Image: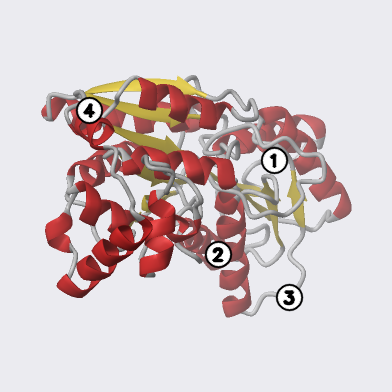
Amino acid sequence: MENRRSRTRSARAGGGVTLQQVAQLAGVSLATASRVLHGSGARNVGDQLRSRVEDAARSLRYVSNAPAQALARSSSSVVGLIVHDVADPYFGAIAAGAMQAAREQELMVMIAATFRESGLEVQYLRSLRAQRVRAIILAGSGTTGISTGGISTAGAGTDPVGTGEELAEEIAAFEAEGGRVVAIGERGLGLDTVAMANRSGAAGAVRALWELGHRELGVVAGPADLTTVAHRLDGARRALRALGAAAGTPVERSDFSQEGGRAAAVRLLRAHPGTTAVLVLSDAMAAGVLAGLQEDLGLAVPEQVSVVGFNDAPYAVNLRPALSTVRLPLERAGQEALRLLLEPEADEPRTVELDTELVLRASTGPAPGR
């Protein structure tokens, strides 16, 4: 994917010439140009690239906004964290990890929640810049550009707000002032990223169900436009193909809510009554799936239908039956994001992928007849 730092149009630094124009003339990324001209990690840039950037800056008569640079670099001990919903256990765990790591570095974390309001992510970035925070963590899934068909993207692990060019420009402007931005979840913005092994996590759940004798599997998925959902679904489908499953695994979509999962489970089992196992791509939906199967359809879990969720939310163990799920290391994700923010910036965006763990509980059992 094209590097966001080389395609953004922003980061006006003074003199009528933008830092991006310098980067384009030199044929380097915006981050590399910033390192050379603003002294942020310049030692990590090779002599040839440094010369190209300096020549381009002289040619364009670029004037660095040194006061803004100095102000940003002398800024604060505060790190911004932008999440979808502070009440969501997914983001609560990420915030806890970031705050624990921040405390060890004598830093504070300022949290902002978008609550699914379009444009708030960009607004919060601007506000955090005005507060002269040291760095910003963006937590939440990016989008694929696929239509959701009217399905809300609300719920655990999602925040599709502000994923366009305006967000990229705001990030570039912040970085040009000496700030740092890290994403938790793949955003397609060319940022240092902490990513979950969503594909392998879903694949592991499918293999475990297959080993229990399940051959008629269904999936309850979130909105199609979310990268996190797309990766989990892709991992499940790849595993099923590798195991020799029949093509056309049924998928029902909903928003990331208990009500949505419940309705999707009813639709899935009514359309495919032979289904013996359901992989649900979030625990919030999985709670609804359990209710839909047992209360609406009168099916026994796991005797007739097994269920596996995703995330290992704190309430998963208290559901009835206790929910099998793919555990995500969410607190560690927050810790790793803060670590990346404090490390010297690399020439190319880095990705730290964290492994998942399948936790089998009472909602999963052998296929009927096994």
Q: Nearer the viewer, mark 2 or mark 3?
A: 2
* 44 left or right of 283 in image: left
Asked whether the residues under the numbered discs 2 and 3 touch, taking CB atoms below 8 Å apart as contact, a structural biologist would say no
Q: Could you say whether the residue bearing mark 2 is in a helix, strand or loop?
A: helix
* x then y, percent, for residue 366: 58, 57
The CA span between labels 2 and 3 is 16 Å
Q: Could you say whether the residue bearing mark 1 is in a helix, strand or loop?
A: loop
Front-most of residues 330 and 325: 330
Q: Is residue 314 visible?
A: no
In the rendered image, the vertical position of residue 103 relative to residue 306, given as above or below: above
All told, the count of numbered labels is 4
Front-most of residues 370 and 311: 311
Q: Could you say whether the residue bearing mark 3 is in a helix, strand or loop?
A: loop
Front-most of residues 255 and 369: 255
Q: Earlier in the sequence, mark 1 or mark 3?
A: 3
Tell me the amino acid under the disc marked 4.
Leu
* x then y, percent, for residue 34: 29, 51
Residue under pointer 1: 300
Q: Nearer the viewer, mark 3 or mark 4?
A: 4
For residue 254, what is the image quadrant? top right
Q: Nearer the viewer, mark 1 or mark 3?
A: 3
Going 58% across and 23% down the picture, which residue do you hit?
115
Residue under pointer 4: 71
